[in-house]
Image (spheres, rainbow, N blue to C red):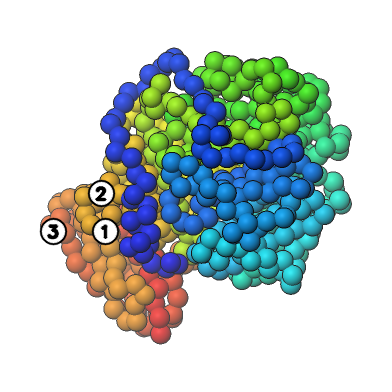
Amino acid sequence: MKGGRPSKARKRAFASVLPVMALFPCAAGAQQVFTDVTSAMGISGQTGLGHSVSWCDIDRDGDLDTAFSNQDGSGFWLYRNDGATFTNITSSAGLGGIGAYRILWGEVTGDDFTDLLLDTGSSQALYRNDGDGTFTNITGGSGLTGSPVCLADFDNDGDADILTLTSSNCIVQHNSGSGTFSQQAIASGSWICGVCLDYDRDGDQDVYLGTYSETANALLRNDGASFTDVTAAAGATWNGSTMGITAGDYNNDGWDDLYLGNYSEPGCKLFRNDGDGTFTDVTVSAGVQGHSDTRTVAFTDYNNDGWLDIFVSHHDFYSYSNIMLRNNGNGTFANVGAALGLSGEMMGDYFGTAWGDFNNDGDIDLFAVGHIDKYVLFRNDQYSTAPANYVTLELEGTVSNRDAIGARVALQAGSAVLTRCVRAGEGYHDFHSMPLELGLGSATTAGSIEIVWPSGLVESYYGIPANQRLYAIEGDGLYTGLADDPSGAIQQAWSLTCSPNPAASLVAVSVTVPAGETAEVAVFDIAGRRVMTLFEGAMPSQSLSLTWNAVDEDGDPVPAGIYVIALESEGRSYARLVTIER
């Protein structure tokens, strides 16, 4: 699928999961309930204490499947989402009889399906997703070592790499593109958890690490060929046994913040990203201290109001050990866990959480595993109790890594701009949904959606109706099952299409811009250098047909490779990737 539009089968599968939903205003203050649907959804028979949990669409059919494990290594389970229920396919998938301390997903073998990466407690195990519901163990010869924490494309070469911890080092395992890896030690120390984020928005993935001891946490800035420890300079120092880490833009200022779940006094920490390379500890003023024995934390917008809330689960509490900190939108939070049905007697002490919309109703659900109620699938019933609008966006990289890990999306809804990033694992045992669930509150339209891909390509779309699931392909377009045209591509007053792709010597470029408005259409190489200007001026009519014959401004043929054809008009920008073959 790389380099082109999704297949017709993929489009049909994607469109088939889109619910037809009315637009509702946000019902502020309305009661909302999370419902335990574990048994009702066919998940049962697990043994031991819950430990790690994850969401992933393993078969690319448009809904989230789940994998989870127990603590002693004797149990690992993979369940396929069949819509009305989940089906245990562990044995038929070739994954029976294994254990997992941590579960990660990411396409690392150069095909179209997301592979499975496990921390077995003593080593790593890599299982290639064969695309037919089965997995093959390809650990031997992969070069993997240590304990995997999360995936990201640290060198922006288009392949997902793996962040790994050993007893004395933090290692980036660089992916060759085919599932074999080479090692780069980026820091010395003893850490147990982490998260990847582009905290300084310079286009590459940085790392924040936590420890179980009183050794200080570490913020490692990605400088390209190496990483620099900037913890102290950035004001992100903490040495209080961090076990849970989550990253997200809680105050909608466009910069990723950090929330730490700590196993020591005085409790959790909220570090606000100030956008200048530094963080400020706002824990007390925000009211998010939590407890001093935290296992797992997560930023999530449970009520679709456009503000990231914080879920926290603590250890050694058999009564109300969970906290849901609702974001008040003014820098403060309120604990509403009990009112939502997420906290109470004999529930909690979760070691792993996974947030994702498993039933595609627009509300983000929770699968939690731990020591008290062990394995619990909570369905979020907001749509029926306190409805708010949303957009779900799934990304597919072409030049970027297949899962678009590290992509940043900015969605304008009303007066707010939501910034969300694609991550593949965070914290200790948490793996949330990679499709982005964005709450719009009462806004019935996303005024704009800007996607900054890991490759550096920026694409923008405008006037997107709420309450639908979208699929964006890097350099190709935005697709939805609710579109009027048969292809599923979103139609609007501004558009840019290029064909054929790949091309040998001639590319037809079709531009749609309201007549009379100014526009510029130009070709750039993948490094951003201008190759040729195709049009500049006022649009003579709404539609314009152009031709690029694969030459530069001097008329010389361009080398084979990937090029960007970009449209700029009245502050709007569109781009398409085109491959020239010689």
Which residue corresponds to mark 1? Answer: 487
Mark 3 / mark 2, whichever is N-terminal = 2
Measuring 44% from the left and 33% from the top, which residue is drawn there?
A: 363
Measuring 41% from the left and 36% from the top, which residue is drawn there?
A: 362
Asked which secondary structure carries label 2, the reply is: loop
Measuring 64% from the left and 17% from the top, which residue is drawn there?
A: 344
Q: Nearer the viewer, residue 250 or 325?
A: 325
**Distance from Cα at disc 3 to Cα at disc 1:** 28 Å
Is disc 3 in contact with disc 2, using a CB cutoff of under 8 Å?
no
Q: Where is residue 385 in the image (x, y as percent from the top left)?
A: 40, 21
Q: Position of residue 120 (x, y in %)?
A: 76, 53
Is disc 1 in contact with disc 2, using a CB cutoff of under 8 Å?
yes
**Distance from Cα at disc 3 to Cα at disc 2:** 28 Å
Other residues around mark 2 within 10 Å, as few (<14) / some (14–19) / many (≥20): few
Which residue corresponds to mark 3? Answer: 540
Amino acid of disc 3: Pro
Work out which quarter of the rendered image holds the C terminus and state it.
Answer: bottom left
Amino acid of disc 1: Ser
Give the label on residue 483, or none. 2
Q: Which of 139 and 244 is in front in this view?
A: 139
Can residue 44 be seen? yes
Q: Quadrant of residue 248?
A: top right
Asked which secondary structure carries label 1, the reply is: loop
Work out which quarter of the rendered image holds the N terminus and state it.
Answer: bottom left
Query: Is 181 left or right of 473, judged from the image as shown?
Result: right
Is disc 3 in contact with disc 1, using a CB cutoff of under 8 Å?
no
Asked which secondary structure carries label 3, the reply is: loop
Measuring 28% from the left and 51% from the top, which residue is drawn there?
A: 490
